[in-house]
Amino acid sequence: MSVAQLWWVFFAVSTVVYVLVIGALVLAIRHARRSETSGELRPADRRRLMVGSAMAATVVVLLCLLASDFVMGHRLFARRDDPDALHLKVTAHQFWWQLEYEDADPSRRLITANEIHVPVGRRIEVSLQTQDVIHSFWLPNIAGKKDLIPGITNNASFIVERPGRYEGQCAEYCGYQHAQMRTVLRAVSPEEFERWKSAQLQPAVQPTTVEQRGGQAVFMSASCALCHSIQGTNAGGTTGPDLTHLASRDMIAAGALRNTPRNLARWIRNPQQLKPGVNMPATALTPKDLDALVSYLSSLR
Ligand code: CUA
C-alpha cells in the first residue's frame, strides 16, 4: 500500500517536471527564432540565473524524493511491537531456506524448510540471517526484497490478507544454484495454521512396513543422518533441511523438483546432476536399499 502511494508521488512529480521542461523547451525555441530575426540576445547574467535556479530546483526535488523513499523503506521494514505477531526466523543456506517458528514455549518451537505456512490476517515478523553468503528473501506478491547478510540480522514484517499460495525466490546472486533457491508461502486460516503446526510438532511417524524399517536403517547407517534431522530418531544433523515431515512438502531441493518417490530416488542417487553445485553429496546405494529409503522418506508425513 505505502509502496503504491510512493509510486504515485513519484509519478505526479515526474509528470509536473516533464511538462515544465517541455514548456521551457518550446519557449526557448520560439525565443531563439525571434532573436535570430532581430539579432538580439538575452543578457548573460539573466541566462546564468535561469540555469542556476533550474539546477537548484532539480536538486531540491531529487532530495525530497530520496527522503520520502527512505522514510517509506524505514516504515516498511521497522520492527513493530505487535504482541500477537508470529515470529519466524529464516536462515539462508546455499541453496535452501531454514525456517524456525519461534514460541515462548520451547516445546512448541518448530524447525522446517523451504515451505512457509502462515495464518492470514496476523502480523508476521521475520528475522533474517545467513549461514554463508548474501542471499535475499523475496515474496513478490507479499513484500519487498530484504537481504540476508553474514553477521547481521535483518527484519521484515508483513500481513497476508488473502489465503493462497505465494511463490518466493532468492533475489541476490548467491552461487551456482541461486535460481533454484525457491520458497513458497501458504497463507491459511488461523485454525488451519494451528492444525498444521501441531502436526509438524509431532515426532516423525515410525516405520510400519518391513521395507520402511529397512529404509530407516539405511538412513541411519548411510551418510544421511550426519546432515539431516528426523525428530524422534537418532538423526540429528543440522547441515541440511530437517526431514521429520518431508512427505508433507510439495517440493524437494528448495523447489527444484516435485516431491515424488521417483524424484526422491533420483535426488539421493545423484543430486549434482539435478542441481549442480549443491552441497549434498551423491549416495551410492543398492537398488533395494534405495527403494527402501525412498519408501521410508515418503512415509514421513
Ligand atoms: Cu540464495 Cu540467491
Image: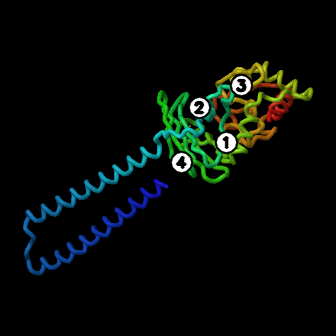
Q: Which residue is mark 2?
A: 93
**Mark closer to the observer (2, 1):** 1
Which element is circle 1 on? strand
Which element is circle 2 on? strand
Mark 1 / mark 3, whichever is N-terminal: 1
Number of other residues with Cα within 10 Å of mark 1, as a class: few under 14, some 14 to 19, many 20 or more: some
**Mark closer to the observer (1, 3):** 1
Distance (Cα) linking label 3 and label 4: 31 Å
Q: Which mark is residue 229?
A: 3
Mark 3: amino acid: Ser
Distance (Cα) linking label 4 and label 2: 21 Å
Q: Are marks 1 and 3 in contact (CB under 8 Å)?
A: no
Mark 2: amino acid: His
Number of other residues with Cα within 10 Å of mark 3, as a class: few under 14, some 14 to 19, many 20 or more: many
Distance (Cα) linking label 3 and label 2: 16 Å
Q: For disc 1, does the CB lie below 8 Å from ligand 1?
A: no
Residue 2: percent from left, percent from top = 46, 54
Quadrant in which residue 168 is drawn: top right
Residue 34: percent from left, percent from top = 14, 79
Residue 258: percent from left, percent from top = 74, 43
Mark 1: amino acid: His
Mark 3 / mark 4, whichever is N-terminal: 4
Mark 3 / mark 2, whichever is N-terminal: 2
Q: Are marks 3 and 2 in contact (CB under 8 Å)?
A: no
Q: Which residue is mark 4?
A: 143
Number of other residues with Cα within 10 Å of mark 4, as a class: few under 14, some 14 to 19, many 20 or more: some
Q: Which residue is mark 1?
A: 117
At a point 12% along the width and 81% down the height, the residue shown is: 37
